[in-house]
Structure formats: structure tokens, C-alpha cells
Image (cartoon, rainbow, N blue to C red):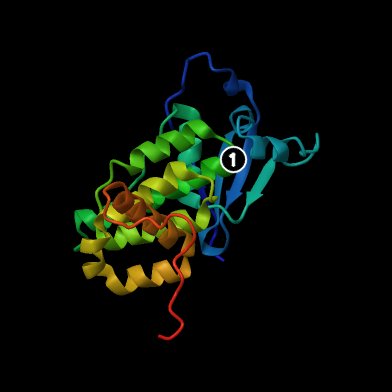
């Protein structure tokens, strides 16, 4: 296993008299295997996240101040720490040769989505709102939007319409065009994630019903002919 990398938190302070400066330093080990990364942060800032506060409260007085989060995404957690110190975050893009702006946008979409779901898990609605706002400023390709839709519908609860509804609305508005470019992958997503296809279909049918282009069946359902 590769040696863990130490990521220093070098961000401006919220105020020059911030009380967290006297707070103990906590070591957070994020990820696992080759992606395992060691980060550090002031304990008082971690206490603002209910999930982390529970872990901190389990520290023994004379024991190490260390939290292990092997299942969390390193980049997303790094942005969370940046937010705790600055009340904002920036996603660092590492482009590859030949990569288009839309391709980069796709990576950025997933970065913000991971931060959104991490914020939900940690219990930080303000960070969720910031991540969601950044999502809507990203321009990306149909393939990237498809990957983003899959992530959203497999990592968020059904009740979270804040992030799900815009995704379903986007595909309901654009599916007749986009499916020509990502047809097979779009079909695969609809089959594998039925909640996504149901939400998209519901929006399309509701719109048709509102426009009077769908016959509404009133009363008892029409009987089917049995001699067909």
C-alpha cells in the first residue's frame, strides 16, 4: 500500500480571533488502499458536523485523536474541510491531454455531487446548498449528465427532490435529443435505476396531460375486448 499523503489545510481564517485556533488537532484518515490520505483539522470545526462530533466524543482522554473514514471520497472530504475554514470550497481540476471543456465539466459535476451527498451524511445543510448551487453552473456533455444522473439516483434518498427533480426534469426536456447520442446508455440507466425512469416519465406524462394531449380515463377503466 502506498504511504498516506499528508494534506495540509492552508486556508484563510474566518476571523482573526477564531476560537478554533486553541482547539486540539485531529487526524482524519480518509479512503483506503492507494487512495488513503491523512488530513488534519481543528477539533472544534469537526464538532459542527453531527456525525463527526459523535466520533470525537468517543476519544479517550489519553488516547490518539484520530478518525478513520475508509469509505469516504478523499477529494470530497478535502472540500468539506476547506468549507469548514472558509465557508466555501473550490474543486481543483486535473485535466488530461485532449480533454474538452465538457469532459472537465463532467468530472466537476460528480465532484460537486459527492460533496453534496457527503454534506447530507455529515448533517451540514449549508454545504449541501452550496454544492447544489455549483452543480447548476457546470456545463457538460450528455455522457457526463448520464453519469451524474446515475450517481444522484443511487446515492440520494427518494425524498430528496431538491437534487433529484432537476435531474429528472433535464432528461424529460432533453431525452428526445440526448438519447440519440447516448441511446444505449440511457436505456441501460432506465432499466437499472427504475426510480429515474419513473420520475422522467411522470414529468413527461404530467406535461402532456396539462397540455391536453393525453386522454384522461374517468370513472371505471374501459373493458378490454376478450376476443382479440
Which residue appears farthest toward the right when viewing the image? 61
How many marks do you count on the picture? 1
Identify the image quadrant of residue 42.
Answer: top right
Q: Measuring 19% from the left and 63% from the top, which residue is drawn there?
A: 98
Q: Position of residue 128 (x, y in %)?
A: 47, 37
Q: In what quadrant of the picture does the N terminus appear?
A: bottom right
Instruction: Please name the residue shown 40% across and 67% down the image.
Output: 189
Residue closest to the eye, 199 or 14: 199
Residue at x-position 50% and y-position 37%: 81
Residue 82 visible in this rendered orientation of the protein: no
Q: Tell me: residue 14, above or below residue 142.
A: above
Q: Which residue is mark 1?
A: 122
Residue 173, compared with residue 224, is above or below; it is: above
Q: Is residue 42 left or right of residue 192?
A: right
Q: Around disc 1, counting alpha carbons within 10 Å, would you say few (fewer than 14), some (14 to 19), or many (20 or more)? A: some
Image side of residue 178 versus residue 185, left or right: left
Furthest-bottom residue in view? 227
Q: Is residue 46 above or below residue 199?
A: above
Direction from residue 121 to residue 215 in the image, left or right: left
Position of the C terminus, as image quadrant, is bottom left
Q: Secondary structure at mark 1?
A: helix
Residue closest to the eye, 55 or 131: 131
| Residue 122: quadrant of the picture | top right
User: Is 6 left, or right, of 48 in this rendering?
Assistant: left
Could one spot residue 161 in this view of the protein?
yes
Residue 185: x and y in percent read 34, 71
User: Where does residue 104 sit, x and y in percent of width and height?
Assistant: 27, 54
Residue sitting at 78 percent across and 40 percent down?
63
Amino acid at each position: 500500500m502506498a504511504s498516506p499523503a499528508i494534506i495540509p489545510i492552508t486556508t484563510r481564517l474566518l476571523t482573526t480571533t477564531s476560537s478554533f485556533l486553541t482547539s486540539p488537532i485531529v487526524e482524519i484518515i480518509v479512503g483506503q488502499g492507494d487512495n488513503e490520505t491523512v488530513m488534519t483539522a481543528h477539533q472544534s470545526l469537526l464538532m459542527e458536523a453531527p456525525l463527526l462530533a459523535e466520533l470525537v466524543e468517543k476519544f479517550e482522554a489519553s488516547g490518539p485523536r484520530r478518525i478513520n473514514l475508509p469509505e469516504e471520497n478523499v477529494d470530497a472530504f478535502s472540500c468539506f474541510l476547506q468549507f469548514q475554514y472558509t465557508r466555501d470550497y473550490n474543486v481543483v481540476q486535473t485535466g488530461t491531454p485532449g480533454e474538452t471543456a465538457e469532459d472537465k465539466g463532467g468530472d466537476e459535476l460528480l465532484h460537486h455531487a459527492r460533496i453534496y451527498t457527503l454534506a447530507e451524511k455529515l448533517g451540514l445543510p449549508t454545504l449541501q446548498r452550496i454544492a447544489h448551487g455549483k452543480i447548476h453552473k457546470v456545463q457538460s456533455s450528455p455522457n457526463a449528465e448520464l453519469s451524474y444522473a446515475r450517481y444522484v439516483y443511487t446515492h440520494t434518498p427518494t425524498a430528496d427532490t431538491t437534487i433529484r427533480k432537476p435531474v429528472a426534469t433535464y432528461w424529460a426536456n432533453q431525452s428526445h435529443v440526448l438519447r440519440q447520442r447516448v441511446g444505449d446508455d440511457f436505456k441501460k440507466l432506465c432499466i437499472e435505476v427504475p426510480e429515474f425512469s419513473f420520475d422522467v416519465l411522470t414529468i413527461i406524462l404530467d406535461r402532456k396531460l396539462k397540455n391536453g394531449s393525453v386522454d384522461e380515463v374517468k370513472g371505471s377503466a374501459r373493458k378490454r375486448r376478450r376476443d382479440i
